Amino acid sequence: FSKPDSAFWSIIICNVWLAVPFCILNLVAGLMAIPDSYYEAAKMDGANMFHSFWYITLPQLKPTVLTILVIRLADAFRVFDSIYILTS
């Protein structure tokens, strides 16, 4: 891990390993919080899957995505320890 290329990729893999489960759990919880009635009403109005995603799913997930971004931004400042441990 002392070479720059291998250190770079090891740090990326370490951060992905730590962050992906948190992000997926939050996004799944956000998706489950969207009522099915929104999609049923959109289907009755003639919306296709793209319109349902663009006008229902994305706006409903905006607070969840913002929360994930804020928490991951705060975590980005705490990455020094893993870089120091992996590269000495």
Image: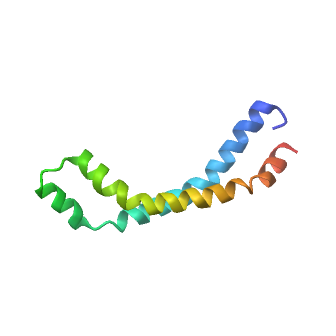
Placement of 67 over or under 16, stated as above or below = below
Instruction: Report x, y in % for residue 31.
Output: 37, 62
Colour scheme of the picture: rainbow
Rendered-image quadrant of the N terminus: top right
Task: Estimate the x, y position of residue 12 in percent, counting from the top left.
Answer: 67, 43
User: Toward which corner of the image does residue 37 lie, by quadrant?
Assistant: bottom left
Question: Horizontal placement of 37 versus 73: left or right?
Answer: left
Query: Which is nearer the eye, 6 or 33?
Result: 33
Q: Is residue 12 left or right of residue 46?
A: right
Q: Position of residue 73 (x, y in %)?
A: 64, 55
Quarter holding the C terminus is: top right
Q: Residue furthest right?
A: 88
Residue 9 placed where, x, y %? 70, 37
Taking the spot 85% from the left edge, 36% from the top edge, the residue there is 2
Residue at (29% x, 57% y) in the render: 56
Which residue does the image show at 36% across and 54% down from the upper left?
Answer: 58
- Asked if residue 8 lies left or right of residue 28, the reply is right
Which residue is drawn at the image coordinates 68% and 58% (left, top)? 75
Q: Give the total of numbered labels.
A: 0
